[in-house]
Amino acid sequence: MSFRDDGKVYLEVGVNGEASKDENPHVPYGADETARDVVECIQHGATVVHYHARFDDGRQAWSDGEISRSVLAAAARDVDPLAYPGYDGRLEHIWAVAEHPPAGAGLLFAPFDPARHVTHALWNEDESRFEATERSNGSHPAYPPELDRFKKAGLVPSIGVFNAVDLRWVMLAARIGILRQPLKIKLFFSDRWVSHNDPDPAVLDFLVSQIPKWIDHEIVVVPYAMSSAERCQELWEHALDRGLGIRVGIGDCPAIHRRVTNAQMVDRAVHLITKRGFSPATQDDLRARFAAPEVDESEMVRVVVNRNRCMGWGVCYTNSPEIYQPDADGYCVVVRPHVDEQLFEKAVEGAKGCPERAIRVELPDDEPVPSDARSIASGKTPV
């Protein structure tokens, strides 16, 4: 269930990013200024704040976890500081904060841009997995090992999607359980960065149409490095008309917001939200929505479907609708790529009933299971 089902939307703020005080004198530098903006934005109605840890002179503190700790610790004296730092592809400072957070200010989100971690990947439909190519040279594996560390640290990836290629990888990763649902997807749009999505409402509609209904997610629309205030406004309004979340902030688009503060940007966003009958989601709403799973997914049974073999007979989702559902054309999709022992038998029942043997139930190596289930996991017909 998304926030809009409860009459709420996600409101994020990008307070500083890589913007400078020359572009807007209110861009916060240093821990004290940044913490002040985190507090003010949340007090004015923001759900989450995204910030870059920066030194007092404005330089980016990409490898200094202490500044992020200071930001969160200072903000925690006044609000629930649901905030997360940016990164340049290196995550060391984020791991440092996650492993040693200040009191009352642990991280929930951490940034993850597939474009920084996944290149030259192939998709193997028969095996339902990614494969690296020789061009990747081992430096960009098809499965980013950073995701394992996210899980270990209890962090939810805040996924930056800059174009349709990024989105395709995210959807495939969610389909096979590499990315845990619900997903937090940030769709970036820019009229200056040609690698970003074009800031056209029709492009936004297209991207949203590429997300299957069975993938649980929240979308945040992010106009970034924009030169047109009108196109920013058009994107925000179009997103809200669809019940999607938005991100505002002078850190994202300083060139068109030269005198306003981040708190004023939040006030404007709250006005747009409330006049549509919504309210901004709260920090408690977000923590509940993205709560950590009770069971370690690495110890669960994995269910995958080979869509090259699926012929849409429908036996799987007729027998086990808790795990299998039809897409718009009647072909099988796995809505629960990981299942616990309570749904294990239903997963096996759906797999055994498939006339095309298109479904695999893959079991942990050390898990004792019935012999017929193990043969399903290996793709063989049970005897």
Image: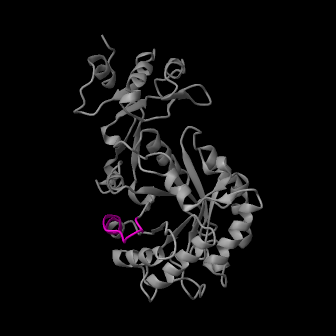
Residue at 41% x, 45% y is 293
As drawn, 104 above or below 4: below
Residue 67 percent location from the top left of the image? 38, 79
Q: Residue 102 in magenta?
A: yes
Q: Is residue 208 above or below residue 191?
A: above
The residue at the point 41 percent across, 76 percent down is: 73
Q: How is the image coloured?
A: one colour
Res. 247 in view: yes
Q: Position of residue 121 (x, y in %)?
A: 39, 47
Drawn side of residue 230 relative to residue 305, left or right = right
Q: Residue furthest top?
A: 383
Q: Nearer the viewer, residue 252 or 107?
A: 107
The N terminus: image quadrant:
top right
Q: Quadrant of residue 194?
A: bottom right
Residue lying at the far right of the rendered structure: 275
Name of the residue lying farthest toward the left = 366
Give x and y (percent) for residue 349: 42, 19
The percent coordinates of residue 134 (x first, y second) are 31, 49
Q: Is residue 234 visible?
A: no
| Residue found 36% across the figure and 67% down from its top | 94
Instruction: Using the image as rendered, state which of residue 288 and residue 206 is in the foreground.
Output: 288
Q: Is residue 251 above or below residue 241?
A: below
- Vertical placement of 359 versus 162: above or below? above
Quadrant assignment for the C terminus: top left
Q: Which of the 4 quarters of the picture holds residue 146?
A: bottom left
Magenta range is 95-106
Which residue corresponds to the image point at 42% horizontal and 79% vertical from the top-left?
60
| Count of all numbered marks drawn on residues in the image | 0
Membership of 2 in magenta stretch: no
